[in-house]
Image (cartoon, rainbow, N blue to C red):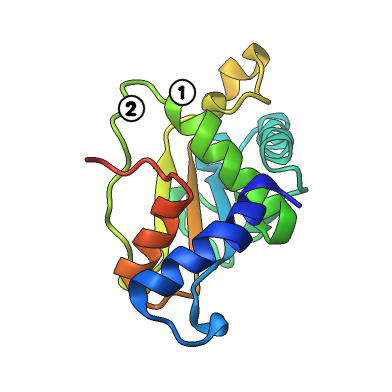
């Protein structure tokens, strides 16, 4: 069992139950999945660079990503139908907790001029975070300097309310701005 999963089961459940007065254990919110998405629009002509993005995302998350393709052609964006436009990974279970632990304790502190992340949630208890470069993760070596890409990380909870989800992520030592 991952460290954060153990922490959730032993400490976080009790603290959330006390703070919000949940009567049933099933009411206590939890992280259900983490979605990591990277757009490859600037690499759309070069298959080798797209494969490098796929390899980097697989190394970061520990799971093989899925290439997403355009549904229809849009000439203004120079996109053709069935052309690869993004790469996405959905993490659940043990890999999800492992990735969240790595994100909070290793990757975010390595971001340049890091002062914490915004406390804005989407209104349904989910948190979205954007990173400008994948180089903050320790699995990425210096060979990836030519293929720098950004990614969006969506942490999906079943909290339903932003304040409950914020407290859940605070219990996982998420570095919100002070």
Q: Which residue is mark 1?
A: 110
Indicate the quadrant where residue 33 lies. bottom right
Indicate the quadrant where residue 142 lies. top right
Label 1: how many residues lie within 10 Å, few (<14), some (14-19) or many (20+)? some
Q: Secondary structure at mark 2?
A: loop
Q: Is residue 29 visible?
A: yes
Q: Is residue 74 left or right of residue 123?
A: right
Q: Relative to residue 49, is residue 24 depicted above or below?
A: below
Q: Which residue is mark 2?
A: 114
Give the image location of residue 148, x and y in percent: 53, 26
Q: Is residue 50 left or right of residue 118?
A: right
Q: Residue at x 28, y 30 (%)?
A: 115
Give the image location of residue 170, x and y in percent: 39, 52
| Viewer-nearest residue: 71 or 59 | 59
- Between the residue at mark 1 and the residue at mark 2, the CA separation in whole angstroms equals 8 Å
Q: Residue at x 67, y 57 (%)?
A: 91
Asked whether disc 1 touches disc 2, contact meaning CB atoms under 8 Å apart, the reply is yes
* Residue 59 tag number: none
Label 2: how many residues lie within 10 Å, few (<14), some (14-19) or many (20+)? few
Indicate the quadrant where residue 62 lies. top right
Work out which residue is located at the far top of the displayed protein and give it. Answer: 142
| Viewer-nearest residue: 128 or 105 | 105
Give the image location of residue 75, x and y in percent: 45, 55
Give the image location of residue 73, x and y in percent: 53, 61
């Amino acid at each position: 069992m991952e460290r954060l999963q153990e922490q959730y089961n032993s400490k976080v459940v009790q603290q959330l139950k006390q703070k919000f007065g949940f009567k049933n254990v099933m009411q206590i919110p939890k992280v259900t999945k983490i979605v990591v998405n990277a757009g490859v629009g600037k690499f759309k002509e070069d298959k080798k660079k797209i494969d490098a993005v796929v390899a980097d995302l697989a190394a970061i998350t520990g799971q093989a990503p899925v290439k997403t393709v355009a549904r229809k052609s849009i000439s203004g964006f120079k996109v053709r139908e069935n052309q690869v436009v993004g790469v996405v990974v959905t993490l659940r279970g043990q890999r999800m907790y492992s990735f969240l632990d790595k994100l909070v304790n290793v990757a975010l502190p390595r971001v340049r001029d890091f002062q914490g992340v915004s406390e804005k949630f989407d209104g349904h208890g989910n948190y979205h975070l954007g990173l400008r470069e994948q180089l903050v993760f320790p699995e990425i070596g210096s060979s990836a300097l030519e293929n720098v890409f950004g990614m969006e990380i969506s942490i999906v909870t079943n909290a339903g309310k932003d304040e409950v989800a914020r407290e859940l992520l605070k219990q996982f030592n998420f570095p919100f701005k002070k």
